[in-house]
């Protein structure tokens, strides 16, 4: 386990919310989407670990595949920018749409901003506002 943590750059760093990195890694490896998302954020931003965009993308992809909307949205942005992965507009759009289907406010807003049809854009913005009200409660 120690060698794996060292390889992933997690041994020296502290996990967010006080959870030890080995516990977070174990949960992510067991399929915990929230743990994978947190590891992805840590690697993406260099929080408690060395910044590693490729590793961040790997964890985001795992969490997105488990249908975690915030990971889908983040992975979409990473794919669009080519951050840690090859730039892929089609895949970025796919993950953005998946996050929006699950009611992720920022994904809905991003789709609205890209929508050429003003009526569809307005509907998406309304959906984003509605979703945002539900996430703040």
Image: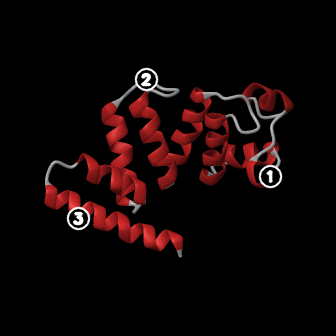
Cα distance in 3D space between marks 2 and 1: 31 Å
Q: Position of residue 136 (x, y in %)?
A: 52, 71
> Which residue is at 22% across, 62% downward?
122
> Which residue is at 43% across, 39% downward?
77
Instruction: Say which element carries label 1.
Output: loop
The residue that label 2 is drawn on is: 86
Left or right of 81 on screen, residue 26: right
**Sequence-earlier tag: 2 or 1:** 1
Question: Which is closer to the viewer, label 3 or label 2?
Answer: 3
Instruction: Say which element carries label 3.
Output: helix
Label 1, residues with CA under 10 Å away: few <14, some 14-19, many ≥20? few
The residue that label 1 is drawn on is: 19
Is residue 92 visible to us here?
yes
Is residue 67 visible to us here?
no
Res. 29 mark: none
The residue that label 3 is drawn on is: 123
Rendered view: 110 above or below 45: below
In front: 44, or 69? 44
Screen quadrant of the N terminus:
top right
In contact (CB < 8 Å): disc 3 and disc 2? no
Q: Position of residue 15 (x, y in %)?
A: 77, 46
Q: Position of residue 99 (x, y in %)?
A: 40, 53
Q: Hey, which residue is sitting farthest bottom in the picture?
A: 137
Cα distance in 3D space between marks 3 and 1: 40 Å
**Sequence-earlier tag: 3 or 1:** 1
**Sequence-earlier tag: 3 or 2:** 2
Question: Which is closer to the viewer, label 3 or label 1?
Answer: 3
> Which residue is at 46% across, 47% downward?
72
Rendered view: 56 above or below 71: above
Cα distance in 3D space between marks 3 and 2: 32 Å
In front: 124, or 27? 124
Left or right of 61 on screen, residue 80: left
């Amino acid at each position: 386990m120690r060698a794996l943590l060292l390889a992933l750059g997690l041994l020296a760093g502290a996990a967010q919310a006080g959870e030890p990195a080995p516990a977070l890694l174990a949960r992510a490896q067991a399929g915990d989407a929230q743990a994978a998302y947190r590891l992805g954020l840590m690697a993406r931003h260099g929080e408690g670990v060395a910044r590693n965009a490729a590793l961040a993308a790997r964890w985001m992809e795992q969490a997105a595949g488990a249908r975690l909307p915030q990971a889908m949205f983040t992975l979409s942005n990473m794919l669009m920018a080519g951050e840690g992965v090859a730039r892929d507009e089609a895949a970025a759009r796919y993950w953005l749409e998946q996050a929006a289907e699950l009611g992720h406010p920022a994904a809905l807003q991003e789709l609205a901003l890209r929508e050429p049809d003003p009526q569809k854009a307005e509907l998406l913005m309304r959906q984003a506002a509605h979703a945002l009200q539900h996430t703040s409660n």
